[in-house]
Image (cartoon, rainbow, N blue to C red):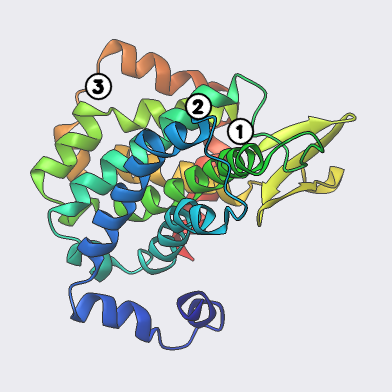
Amino acid sequence: MQAILDATISQGEPIQELLVTHGKVPTLVEELITVEMWKQKVFPVLCRVEDFKPQNTFPIYMVVHHEASIINLLETVFFHKEVCESAEDTVLDLVDYCHRKLTLLVARSGCGGPPEGEGSQDSNPMQELQKQAELMEFEIALKALSVLRYITDCVDSLSLSTLSRMLSTHNLPCLLVELLEHSPWNRREGGKLQQFEGSRWHTVAPSEQQKLSKLDGQVWIALYNLLLSSEAQARYCLTSFAKGQLLKHWEKHGKTCVLAAQGDRAK
């Protein structure tokens, strides 16, 4: 909370400085992945056990929410390049984490988007917790997108292994193009365009619909960093498939969005 407050009022950011000074960024990344594994391996088992009916699910909710807390903190502090550099070797694990979240986001965008937060009267506490975790997963993925964009801001100083992981192993430019194609943070309800921002869906006024949203801007800036930096250009194998994927979206929105992204990056 203090880190977000410091970033909001644009003053000194002691939390970010403390994390770097005491070498705690790798610890945060390790904790993030630990909770992710717990949610994948342990939480589903708890939900399936028929005789596990706790009266109070708050302790479990705190574990589930812990991942969201960490990724939110990382999104706030990774704006600063020294934080990315202090992550050291764990930046590889963080890139892998972001790739998993964005791949899941693309896959789910073809299934109607994130679940609604409304509960059912017939649901038991564990089922309600499952629904909350699914909605939280969508928000976590959007935070991971921002973290990945901040990592790409440091592309010229990243290790060769990290660059190789981003460009060759995961082919992030093509994944980012798929995100732009699906734009899971946009939806239409009752003929009106809505965008997901600040943990809520907002109706976009007709006069604002041609503007680049914050999340669209994050994707375009990440693409700009990965495709146009000298370090990345020297290592990205631009195959015919990759060209086709990249040009597919460029033909629809390209020049306008890249110019907007360049403007946002300058700010």
Label 3 Cα neighbours within 10 Å, binned few <14 / some 14-19 / many ≥20: some
Rendered location of residue 104, percent (x, y): 46, 29
**Marks 2 and 1 close (CB-CB < 8 Å):** yes
Quarter occupied by residue 132: top right
Q: Residue at x 48, y 81 (%)?
A: 2
Specify which label sits upstream in the sequence, 3 or 2.
Answer: 2
Q: Residue at x 48, y 50 (%)?
A: 64
**Marks 3 and 2 close (CB-CB < 8 Å):** no
Q: Residue furthest front?
A: 51
Q: Residue at x 23, y 32 (%)?
A: 167
Q: Which residue is mark 2?
A: 106
For label 2, the SS is helix
Rendered location of residue 100, percent (x, y): 36, 34
Q: Which residue is mark 3?
A: 238
**Marks 3 and 1 close (CB-CB < 8 Å):** no
Name which residue type carries label 1: Pro
Label 1 Cα neighbours within 10 Å, binned few <14 / some 14-19 / many ≥20: many
Q: Which residue is mark 1?
A: 184
Mark 3 vs mark 1: in front: 1
Rounded to the nearest whole Å, what is the CA distance between mark 3 and mark 2? 22 Å
Name which residue type carries label 2: Val
